[in-house]
Amino acid sequence: MQFAAQCSPRCCKFLQFHAPNATLPNIIGFLTIGHHAIALPLIGISVNIYTFNIVINCYCCVNGVYFGFSLLGTLFKRGYTPDVTTFNTLLNGLILQDKTPEAVQLFKKLMRMREIEPNVVMYGTIVNRLCRTGEHY
């Protein structure tokens, strides 16, 4: 099965494994429609925090971090609680799109709220980016 060129390899492997009978138009629609999580059951994928994180990562890898944030809203509406992986993915997505100030702002907000306990990946993502750019926040 061939997937859209903008689909990250990790996302494509996930979709191939969980939805082997999905057609290319369904996959492209899944990656581009505004109702991200609603489309998952249509291609045979059950919705949980792990699938949300994978789809958020897919969007972040194709320069769609703001779609990832809208999916975070959907995650909240469905009663799921985001985990550290969710926010690591969003921070990385912001950094991939050269939105370091927004990434630092999100990181600081997470630290203030103390809802999510940052892990070594989160610290490493922020420190690595700040070291590369030489920016101070």
Image (cartoon, helix red, strand yellow):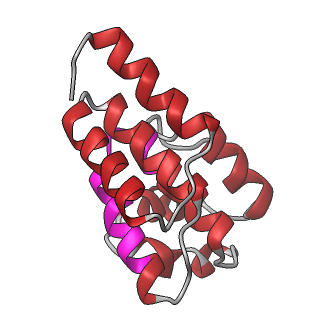
Instruction: Determine whether 55 is above or below 62 in the image.
Output: below
The reply to whether the magenta stretch includes residue 72 is: yes
Quarter placement of the C terminus: top left
Instruction: Determine whether 121 is above or below 111 in the image.
Output: above
Q: Position of residue 11 (x, y in %)?
A: 61, 47
**Residue drawn at point x = 31 percent, y = 56 percent:** 109
Task: Give 38 or 82, whichever is nearer the viewer.
Answer: 82
Task: Give 108 or 38, whichever is nearer the viewer.
Answer: 108
The reply to whether the magenta stretch includes residue 64 is: yes
Q: Can you tell which quarter of the image residue 6 is in?
A: top left
**Residue drawn at point x = 42 percent, y = 49 percent:** 90
Task: Give 70 or 112, whichever is nearer the viewer.
Answer: 112
| Residue 14 seen in this snapshot | yes
Q: Can you tell which quarter of the image residue 134 is in?
A: top left
**Residue drawn at point x = 32 percent, y = 67 percent:** 70
Magenta span of residues: 59-74
**Residue drawn at point x = 32 percent, y = 58 percent:** 67
Position of residue 120 in the picture relative to residue 55 (left or right): right
Instruction: Determine whether 21 is above or below 15 in the image.
Output: below
Q: Position of residue 118 (x, y in %)?
A: 55, 48
